[in-house]
Amino acid sequence: MSDNNDIGLKIGDACFANPVFLASGPAGYGIEYANYLDITKVGGIVTKTISFEPRKGNPGVRLQETPSGLLNSIGLENVGAEYFFREKIPVLVSAGVKPVISVAAEDWGDYRKLIDFIARQENIEIIELNLSCPNVERGGMAVGSNPSLLGRYVRHAKDLLPRIAILAKLTPNVSDIARLALAAEEAGADGITAINTVIGMDIDISRAKPVFKRVRAGLSGPAIRPVALDAVWRIARTVDIPVIGVGGISSVDDALKFFMAGASGIQVGTALFYDPGLPARIIEKLEAGGIPPAIKYSVDKTERKDDDGTAPHNSST
């Protein structure tokens, strides 16, 4: 462990007392956990993803347990940007919480309206671009799996929000997540969040039909932790901006592994449903022993650049 017990984290110009966040989705709008956790002690809360207009989300079954995780098909249900900034954010801020605003859009037009709206808000330090949700028809993963589109979305946010730190949340459902991280960094992202959920499905054998209306859903929880760790490790040796690891963190030791893989911060998601005290224990561990350094990599990251210096050669060593 490091002897340096300063566990503060800086992403762009946004500073946090510690690198432990509540992940978007399971954390709701943040205040829901006030009775279970001292929410002022976490580095920040990544709020439930908002779109410009309110969304009802997907019909039918939305959550399904698996032996080692949780399938969800929420569909980005949310109250919309105007209500969110009028009713939700003031409650969080007055409670002493530093919010990380998660945002998503169906298409480029909605995205521009949303970013324009955020540009008129006050006291926002950081947003997380959710360009990787697998549970919507448009936007989401379709944008986040295309490096060119991803770069366009990040660059637009950075141009209109020059004083707000930008996190790009990436999907693992691609052949090379490091290439996407590099595209986000080159477009001006201040940090990378990795990963969103892994695509999965389940079948109701009594009805001989898929459980979810959209058939496929997003898998989170312990089952995806090795995938998330690998993604963080690959991204951390490709970009120079902070990487925030998320995916299946269910114990203090799990969190330490993400720092050793190269993460600068972590988010706790699905585990909040059954262990809301976990973020506090992770913080206590980091305060006592410092943040563990990243393990030394066997391959220099400069070897991962193509001849034009813009993309990695491969995804494994």
Image (cartoon, grey):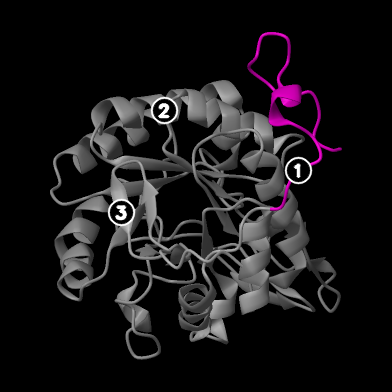
Measuring 33% from the left and 42% from the top, which residue is drawn there?
165
- Reading the chain from its start, which is encountered first: label 3 or label 1? 3
- Reading the chain from its start, which is encountered first: label 2 or label 3? 3
* Residue 200 on image: x %, y %: 75, 58
* Residue 116 on image: x %, y %: 22, 34
* Residue corresponding to mark 3: 15
Along the line of sight, the residue nearer the viewer: 21 or 88: 21
* Residue corresponding to mark 2: 188
Q: Amino acid at mark 3?
A: Cys
Q: Nearer the viewer, mark 2 or mark 3?
A: 3
Question: Magenta region, mostly helix, strand or loop?
Answer: loop
* Residue corresponding to mark 1: 297
* Residue 70 on image: x %, y %: 67, 72
Q: Is residue 34 left or right of residue 69?
A: left
Q: The magenta stretch spans which residues?
A: 295-317
Task: Identify the image quadrant of residue 88.
Answer: bottom left
Residue 286 in the image: above or below residue 167 = below
